[in-house]
Amino acid sequence: MEHTAQMVPLNYYLFLSTFLFCIGVMGVLFRRNAIIILMCIELMLNSVNLLLVAFSSYNGNSDGQVFVFFIMVVAAAEVAVGLALLISIYRNIGSTDIDVLNKLKW
Amino acid sequence: MTETITNNPTLTFLGLLIPLLPLMGFLVNGLLGKYLPKGSTGWIGSLTILASFVCVLMIFKDLGAAQSIQIDVFNWISFGNIDISFGLWIDSLTLIMMMVVTGVGFLIHLYSIGYMHADEGFTRFFTYLNLFIFFMLLLVMGSNYLMMFIGWEGVGLCSYLLIGFWFKNDAYNDAAQKAFVMNRIGDLGFLLGMFFILFHFGTLDIQAVQEIAPSLTADSTLLITITLLLFVGAIGKSAQLPLYTWLPDAMAGPTPVSALIHAATMVTAGIYMVVRSNVLFALAPTTLQVILWIGVATSVFAAVIGLKQNDIKKVLAYSTVSQLGLMFAALGLGAFNSGIFHLVTHAFFKALLFLGAGSVIHALSGQQDIRQMGGLKKLIPITYITFLLAALAIAGFPLLSGFFSKDEILAHAFEQNKAIWTILFISSLLTAFYMFRLVFLTFFNSFRGTEEEKHHIHESPWTMTVPLIILCILSVFGGVLGLPVVFHVNHWLDTYLASVTAPSAALVHHGEALSHSVEIGLLSFAGIAAILVIIYAARKYITLRAMPEDDATITGLPKLIYNKFYVDEIYHSLIVVPLFKMSEWFGNFIDKQIIDRAVNGTATMMDSGGKTLRLLQNGNTGTYVFAMVIGMVVLFIIRLLI
Amino acid sequence: MYSVLSLIVCFFTIAGHYVLLNAQFLAITHIIVYAGAIMVLFLFVVMLLNLNAETEMHKSGKLQIAATIAAGMLFVTLLASFRSTTFGTFSFPPPSDMGLVQHVGQRLFTDYLLPFEISSILFLSAMIGAVVLSKKERH
């Protein structure tokens, strides 16, 4: 298929990806609910995906897309396990507030 | 100069034994003293000194006047191009000093066996005495200034230990501390002088310094500085103005200590040092002038104070200061041989005077005020006769040892400066007067003490009287060491010490030599004047029975003299009190406010730092994530910047 | 819950970007996996735990400010580092059939076969883990 080249400059994608990433970081630092934090982690992963695809497209190399595929795989697995953990914690402690989970010291 | 022997094993062995024997005595008495029977420690202490004396005599027999022995025990300090060895040097001057130190020292040890026999610190006394002799021997035998300084400091230490021997008395401890501190002030000068010598000459070896010195310009600032600094050390050690006040206070120690340390040996260390460095001093005539005037001033000043003292030992102490002043005056005139001559004769009769005073004190069971004495001449005859002869010697009675040594100095003074001669002559007359005031008040007329004391008066045991007799013989006949040339006999000491002092003789400015008639005239004039003064004193104190006033009734100029011109009080208010105030201020302000706060502040800082760092591990996941982000940022920044 | 929904919208937009970048296969996969599976999981958990906006805890104001500053610093740093890098040459225009299923599939099954197979094991372990963890405690 024909594709008119309307190239969005790469810098824009860099900027967007970085922005998304930092929003994700801010969310992790900002929120107390563990579920929201997990979602922000997903957001960070996605921003990286976006960047990878952008580079892959601009370099004409489809290695980037394969890599993104695998990142998605890992993200899915991680979310599954993470949420299972969260439910188990909720059953023990009764809340998903991470400030309550402060036993990681001795 | 001298011919140096370095490879004669017998002489080296003897030379090493001389200081080693007292050291061994010190160690044996010090470490094993409490296991040995009490009397034996005294004999151990005395016999080591006697053995040392015998070694000295053996070397004396073998060594010629112009020979010397050098013993390098080991190479002590060597870095860069500075080499200081632990070395001993024995030449004619050293032998004279060693004979005085060990000979008179032995007699005093013997005397102490009797004098201290009832004291509980008997063993400790002999330990300290042996240590003192060891250090004094190191001082006179040292081949470089550092060895001399070791001995110098060591005798200061032993002086402190011995003056404060009866340490349970606070006043005695204060006196010991005063002696030590004043000595220390002098030692600072000595040390600075040594630094200058090391810096400019590159070596501290005395012979090497004497060889290099003539190549410097005479009377240069450098030489004046070095010699003045060394002389400051001598001022402290030999009790000249202004650092003399410790010597009368040092009479707080037992009398044998006063005899040994403050009459015969330690205080003469300053004179020995100047004579040893005679080339250096001869090249700095300005310093010699300073020495001369300080010596003269001290001589007169102390003699005046001695006129009005009422404690036997204090009179003798001021007499020592005065005679030391006379010796320094001799050195200032460039007459180094005469200084040594007077040092030797002074050792004899001053030690005798002190030991005699000790005998009197022992007989009276501790009484020291001459106003409570009198009429002792029949009760303790041996003490009386020896004391009288010693007093005659110091006063300059014709043909006794003091007469020859003192008049040699006066003759040199007459050659150079008539004014100096006059002042020294007056000082000698004062000496004769106060010595005989002492003799007549102590031994003549009738006893003024209590009946109980009179009942207990007894002559001293043989261990005390034999040294008195020996010293008496030496005081009377000691003049043979230096009979004046004018009598057509050889001045033995002059020729013996020639190798040591000749290098400087050429450099010192002597006046024109006196003709024989003038010399004989001076001798007879001095002798007759001494006799006249003695007769005057006899008339005042024996016939007219004049008594020194009670402390309460004394007024005017006599009061000023009696209170030692208030020098001690002046020192106290000018120096001691500000020092104490300054140290109080330091203690309160700098120590408490600044240093304590700094230390406590550091501790508090550590504490709060720890509390803050503890937050890093509070287990809160959010904090951990935060830290991760911050770490990432920092890493990125570093990556960016590098 | 609204946040979950917003995130789903976000994922859709990202998928749109994938399409723009000639990664059509990835776009579809993205929607299916993320919006379809992961977010649904999240929704399930949110419903299960009965989370409300009112019971939400907030961090203290200081920490919020600190978090904002930290994230901001990260952003600025990353941007600064990007400015100082140079990019390689681009092939322009890119092959337009790069992201089609055939090509991606070809790459997957030839060059990246091993990771492909291992990822299946990864899924297996994740499944087992999730099941074990969320079992209710027996006595």
Image: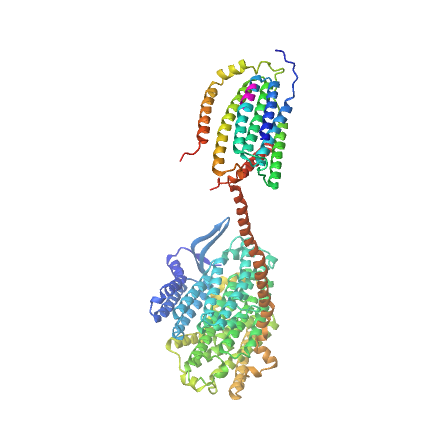
Horizontal and vertical percent position of residue B238: 52, 67
Q: Is residue B90 left or right of residue A55?
A: left
Q: Is residue B16 above or below residue A8?
A: below
Q: In the image as oriented, which residue stretches furthest toward the top?
A: A1
Q: Is residue B455 above or below residue B112?
A: below
Between C82 and B534, the residue placed more toward the observer is: C82
Horizontal and vertical percent position of residue B105: 42, 69
Between B37 and B241, the residue placed more toward the observer is: B37
Q: Is residue B532 left or right of residue B45?
A: right
Figure disc tally: 0
Q: Is residue A103 above or below residue B555?
A: above
Q: What is the magenta segment's predominant secondary structure?
A: helix
**Which residue corresponds to the image point at 63% horizontal and 15% vertical from the top-left?**
C93
Query: Looking at the image, can residue B254 be seen?
Result: yes
A105 falls in the magenta region = no
Horizontal and vertical percent position of residue A4: 65, 14
Q: In the image as oriented, which residue stretches furthest toward the bottom?
A: B543
C29 falls in the magenta region = yes
Of the 4 image quadrants, the one containing the C terminus of chain B is top right
Between B71 and B336, the residue placed more toward the observer is: B71
Which corner quadrant of the image does residue B325 belong to? Answer: bottom right
Q: How is the image coloured?
A: rainbow
Boundaries of the magenta span: C28-33
Between B260 and B387, the residue placed more toward the observer is: B260
Horizontal and vertical percent position of residue B10: 37, 59
Which corner quadrant of the image does residue B571 belong to? Answer: bottom right
Query: Looking at the image, can residue B220 be seen?
Result: no
